[in-house]
Amino acid sequence: RGVRGGVPRAPPPQQPRTPAMAAAAEVAAFLQRQREAHTDATEEYTRMEDLYNRKLWHQLTVELAAFVSHPRFEGSDGSELAELYEHFIKHFEGKMNLLSLTKLVVAIARLFPNDRATLFVTSLLTKAEDSPEALTLGRAELAALKLKAGDAPACKELLDDAEKVINQMAGMDVDTHISFYTAQSSYYKQQGPAQAFYKSALLLLSYQSLDKMPPQEAASLSFDLGIAALVATGVYNLGELLQHPVVGVLEQRGDSAWLAELLRVFNAGDLEAYERLIAGHRAQLEAQPALVSHAAFLKEKIALMSLMDLVFAHVGPSADHRVPFELIAERIRLPLDEVELLVMRAMSLKLIRGEIDQVDGLVLVSWVQPRVLSMEQVGGMAELLQKWKGQVQNTLVFLEAEAPEFANDANF
């Protein structure tokens, strides 16, 4: 049979395979392999494929975030998630929010050995340069990895760069703050000073509560905070810490309840209770190198805090602001000739302000460093205000009796 026109038609040419088609085929094959290899995650891999094919990038990001944080990956070597990133996430990471991408990379990297995690996070930093928030999170995580590797200078450099952004940006993502202050507090715990660790750890707890941490991590941080509060040179107000759940965590653990008690004793400046506690918990105290090496400083610190507590009762509307040397010597158990040196030390640290009357042996106090008060101290303030109220009333009665023209003057 002939063909009209005498020339048979050639079949239409095949369309060339585009990169997008190749990527889609690779993704489909990879996800199928994963479903077969990890039958417990079949539904998750199927949802990922569906969202990828429909190009629902935000929903896919949310699905991935939930997947990488699944408890089944705890204790694993991260190989399954490494394959997920290499053969799946890489195909569309350019369409993802940079901060979300960084969070995924950080979550995966935390399962890797330190060297591999460092390379993995480092490779991310160039991709995150257009997002200060994502870059800061990546730097904070890399700083923690550098510290684990023993490279403290590199860690500090990364933390300094990250801190500049944190101080300049308002409303930064909570996870970025948590990652930064976790790395920073770890750095200061290792390198010091204790005061910097104390401040950084409290800032960490303002973004991540203890009940959101693994129990062992929460207990360790609480204990380290308690020790730092005692040995830090610039911390003379423990009221804020005593009202924090940190103290509750210490008290719940039998092996650290003594530290909570010690913090309360210091805050009250109770030297008698301090000596009793040292005698009763000598083994626990001597097991802490930081406390042993700061023994002389701790003795001075509780003496200063005792002085602050004593002076606090002599400052206020109804107080006379005059504290005799004899009273200070009796309260702090000092020889009389050493009282002036202690008061001068407190003034040099800006714990109190006032004048020293060497002739009459008095301290004339005008100010004491503000403190977070315990309920007992609040009760003491209430008593002072009641006395002041009575003094004002007596003064008013005296004026009415002695100068009635003032009492009748509407402008008085």
Image (cartoon, rainbow, N blue to C red):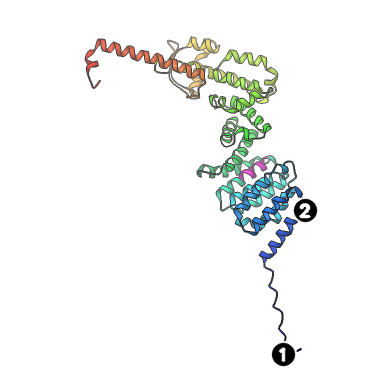
For the record, the magenta segment spans: 139-147
Residue 6, disc: 1
Residue at 67% over, 32% down: 215
Mark 1 packing: few (<14 Cα in 10 Å), some, or many (20+)? few
Q: Are marks 2 and 1 in contact (CB under 8 Å)?
A: no
Residue at 62% over, 33% down: 211
- Vertical position of residue 234 compared to residue 90: above or below: above
Q: Secondary structure at mark 1?
A: loop
How far apart, in angstroms, are the residues tagged by discs 2 and 1? 54 Å
Question: Main structural element of the magenta stretch: helix, strand or loop?
Answer: helix
Please give left or right for residue 270 compared with residue 18 in the image. Answer: left
Question: As drawn, which residue projects farthest toward the right?
Answer: 37
- Vertical position of residue 171 compared to residue 400: above or below: below
Residue 36, disc: 2
- Amino acid found under the numbered disc labelled 2: Glu
Residue 19, disc: none
Q: Earlier in the sequence, mark 2 or mark 1?
A: 1
Residue nearest the observer in this picture, 22 or 347: 22
Q: Quadrant of the C terminus?
A: top left
Residue 46 location, x and y as percent? Answer: 70, 54
Residue nearest the observer in this picture, 293 or 90: 90
- Amino acid found under the numbered disc labelled 1: Gly
